[in-house]
DNA sequence: GACCTGCTGCGGCGTG
């Protein structure tokens, strides 16, 4: 066997970091014929081998993060194995996707077998036999989803202390995907409960895409101690970016498909008809209609069709097929996808990334862009924005979508992204965690629950009285019940929830119909809006005719068809736009420079938008009167805009929020100014009182059980921004 | 007009 020379150390770090790895791991690295470790891999060795500090690793997708973590982790575990010191699972890796777990399992199997450290993949598609094996002989590395770990706590609560007695590391893959979400709140709670069961701290290691806000991610990883988390970041060489934002105009009032107009699709076709590309769109319906439009153009040219849609309603098989086509270098392939392909599923090397329509968030745009330009090639991004061709209203003349896109690109280039809310306790997820701990421990006192989940756990923002209110609300709804001695147990309703497998996820999904063909199920579609037999459906990049709807079986039977089909009426909730983006939009309007990344039409649209902005007097006012309506421009995120609506409605003023603006019908500027003066004079209302007026405050899975009072408090903290809204109204009261 | 993610235990059936 010839042995390549060992990798050399980089100049910026200790050259002997490689020497800290276990011999077996070193040997494996040589056998991979790697000429050197990447800087991030080298820098990660020392803090991880040390084992007494939390580490945040930030690098682009495919930046070698997995190896950066597992070379040192495996080194430590291999040494333990040699000394015969293992009596349990030593490393848990929490992953947001089953596909990532499968991928990682494949990548680690060879290395781990070499050094005698078992590695087990564990999620809903893994058979019981492998799970039983690990439970009988717990050791090594466990790759698992948060939901499967939750299930372990609920159904095998008495065994977790034994399984994790020797836990050294908790690794979180794709940490950015959890930031500020219900699932993230669950993950943080599970990390704490793992350490609690083990009886000691474990080193937490977060893997993340290059984030704008690394401190927030560090704080997420270890609440209250984010400052002490070691950050290892691969800044790269500032990957070169080729970027163009293209403007289009079309009669959007006539268009039904939304999104891109014909001219945009035709240009897009020329960009993506060869090579390997990803076209990101903002809805599943658009993924279907855009893939169909591109396919039609390929058919016109009598070319093999390289276009495949990819979204969350397609079956796992169809998605895997699209991913496989993208990976296969021998023939051109382009996927038209939603956020499904934002996360780190390996799709190989992508030539061009396209965003159709204004991107949903800056963080999302960054993720999407990160899919392009691997292995040294520059990242290539096209953004297509279509605006109204003959604008009739002042709002249409503002060119809001184009300006929002420019604002987002500017923020992206300045490495900014939306900050997550890590302060406000996620009450819906706390309900889940209360039930889960009660199941795990076969009951617990209120004090013990409060200590484990809040004081020491992942909900430190909860005060004692609010926690008592929560338990009372759960008692009233029979989620928990109290024995005479004070012991809390799951109640009748709590047992029902715990005994259904849907309990383990922190997020909720509506029930759907399966779309069934002769060859099996292709995916799912919403139960409402209803479809009838005979309807033509565009789905999975093809046309189908509905043969029969079977409500009892929750199935829609379809057969292949030809002709004008439309995608199913997918329903979804809006992705809120943040403060930072809207504030930046105002700066774009006020500015004079035309970014070089805009094409000619885009530059014209920007100038039109700026002209309309000035003509409406928005450079020094926040209200414009048009057609008997007052149009309010807070230039703040959706949260502030919603709060303004609630404040106005409370004093009997009809107000509606639509994107960047709030509209108040039948009211001129001077009357609106009087209303604002009245509201300002009354002073800021109690946010919880304001929340009480809101009819439907449910946003998360277990909100339903909180009761009116706690739900109002939760809504006030998460969905309202009273100071922001009052600040805006004060401006209106002063100047209009 | 508007994203994404996840899931246990057990009974029933077919096969070796």
Image (spheres, coloured by chain):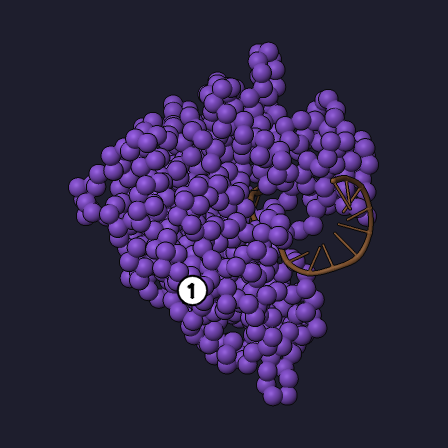
Q: Colour of chain B?
A: brown
Which residue sits furthest left?
A11
Residue at image x 66%, y 32%?
A539
Residue at image x 54%, y 46%?
A98
Which residue sits furthest bottom?
A485
Q: Relative to residue A602, is residue A235 depicted above or below? A: below
Q: Position of residue A421 (x, y in %)?
A: 43, 59
Is residue A725 shown to the viewer in this render? Answer: no
Which residue sits furthest front?
A1
The one nearer the camera, A719 or A222, is A222
Q: Position of residue A708 (x, y in %)?
A: 61, 70
Q: Relative to residue A216, is residue A306 depicted above or below? A: above
Q: Is residue A735 left or right of residue A669?
A: left
Which quadrant of the figure contains the N terminus of chain A?
top left
Residue at image x 57%, y 74%?
A441
Q: Position of residue A471 (x, y in %)?
A: 58, 76
Identify the residue under disc 1: A166
Q: Quadrant of residue A376?
A: top left
> The chain coloured purple carries which letter?
A
Q: Secondary structure at mark 1?
A: loop
Residue at image x 65%, y 79%?
A481
The one nearer the camera, A532 or A232, is A232
Label 1 CA crowd tier, 10 Å (few <14, some 14–19, many 20+): many
Q: Quadrant of residue A305?
A: top right
Is residue A43 shown to the viewer in this render? Answer: yes
């Amino acid at each position: 066997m010839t042995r390549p020379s060992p990798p050399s150390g980089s100049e910026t770090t200790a050259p002997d970091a490689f020497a800290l790895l276990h011999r077996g791991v070193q040997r494996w690295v040589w056998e991979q014929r790697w000429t050197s470790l990447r800087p991030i891999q080298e820098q990660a060795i020392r803090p991880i081998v040390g084992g007494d500090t939390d580490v945040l690793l930030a690098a682009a997708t495919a930046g070698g993060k997995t190896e950066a973590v597992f070379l040192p982790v495996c080194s430590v575990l291999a040494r333990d194995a040699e000394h015969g010191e293992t009596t349990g699972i030593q490393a848990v890796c929490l992953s947001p996707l089953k596909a990532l777990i499968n991928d990682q399992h494949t990548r680690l199997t060879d290395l781990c077998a070499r050094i005698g450290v078992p590695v087990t993949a564990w999620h809903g598609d893994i058979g019981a036999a492998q799970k039983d094996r690990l439970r009988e002989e717990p050791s090594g590395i466990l790759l698992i989803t948060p939901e499967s770990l939750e299930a372990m706590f609920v159904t095998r609560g008495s065994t977790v202390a034994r399984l994790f007695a020797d836990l050294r590391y908790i690794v979180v893959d794709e940490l950015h995907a959890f930031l500020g979400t219900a699932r993230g709140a669950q993950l943080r709670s599970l990390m704490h409960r793992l350490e609690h069961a083990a009886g000691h701290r474990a080193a937490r290691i977060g893997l993340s895409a290059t984030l704008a806000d690394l401190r927030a991610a560090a704080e997420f990883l270890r609440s209250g101690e984010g400052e002490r988390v070691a950050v290892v970041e691969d800044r790269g060489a500032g990957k070169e970016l080729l970027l163009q934002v293209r403007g289009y105009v079309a009669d959007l009032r006539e268009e039904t498909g939304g999104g891109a107009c014909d001219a945009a699709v035709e240009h897009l076709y020329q960009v993506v008809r060869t090579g390997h590309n990803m076209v990101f769109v903002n809805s599943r319906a658009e993924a279907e209609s855009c893939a169909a439009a591109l396919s039609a153009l390929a058919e016109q040219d009598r070319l093999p069709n390289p276009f495949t849609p990819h979204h969350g309603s397609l079956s796992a098989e169809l998605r895997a097929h699209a991913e496989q086509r993208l990976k296969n270098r021998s023939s051109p392939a382009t996927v038209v996808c939603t956020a499904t392909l934002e996360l780190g599923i390996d799709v190989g090397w992508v030539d061009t990334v396209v965003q159709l329509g204004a991107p949903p968030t800056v963080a999302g745009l960054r993720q999407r862009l990160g899919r392009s330009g691997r292995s040294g090639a520059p990242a290539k991004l096209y953004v297509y924005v279509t605006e109204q061709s003959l604008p009739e209203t002042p709002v249409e003349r503002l060119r809001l979508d184009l300006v929002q896109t420019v604002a987002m690109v500017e923020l992206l280039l300045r490495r900014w992204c939306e900050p997550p809310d890590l302060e406000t306790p996620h009450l819906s997820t706390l309900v889940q965690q209360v039930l889960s701990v009660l199941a795990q421990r076969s009951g617990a006192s209120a004090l013990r629950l409060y200590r484990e989940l809040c004081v020491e756990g992942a909900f430190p923002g909860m005060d004692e009285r609010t926690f008592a209110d929560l338990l009372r609300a759960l008692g009233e709804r029979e989620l928990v019940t109290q024995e005479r001695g004070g012991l809390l147990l799951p109640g009748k309703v709590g047992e029902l929830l715990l005994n259904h497998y849907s309990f383990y996820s922190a997020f909720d999904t509506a029930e759907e119909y399966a779309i069934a063909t002769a060859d099996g199920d292709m995916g799912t579609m919403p139960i409402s809006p209803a479809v009838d037999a005979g309807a033509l459906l565009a789905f999975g990049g093809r046309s189908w005719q509905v043969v029969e709807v079977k409500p009892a079986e929750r199935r829609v039977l379809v057969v292949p068809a030809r002709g004008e089909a439309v995608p199913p009426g997918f329903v979804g909730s809006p992705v809120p736009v943040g403060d930072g983006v809207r504030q930046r939009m105002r700066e774009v309007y006020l500015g004079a420079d035309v970014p070089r990344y805009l094409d000619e039409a885009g530059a014209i649209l920007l100038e039109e938008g700026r002209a309309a902005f000035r003509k409406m007097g928005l450079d020094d006012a926040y209200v414009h009167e048009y057609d008997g309506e007052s149009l309010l421009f807070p230039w703040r995120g959706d949260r502030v805009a919603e709060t303004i609506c609630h404040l106005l409605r409370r004093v009997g003023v009809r107000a509606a929020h639509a994107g960047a603006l709030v509209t108040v019908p039948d009211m001129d500027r001077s009357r609106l100014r009087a209303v604002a003066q009245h509201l300002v004079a009354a002073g800021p209302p109690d946010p919880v009182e304001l929340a009480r007026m809101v009819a439907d405050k449910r946003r998360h899975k277990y909100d339903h059980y909180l009761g009116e009072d706690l739900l109002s408090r939760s809504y006030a903290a998460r969905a309202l921004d009273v100071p922001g809204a009052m600040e805006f109204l004060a401006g209106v009261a002063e100047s209009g």
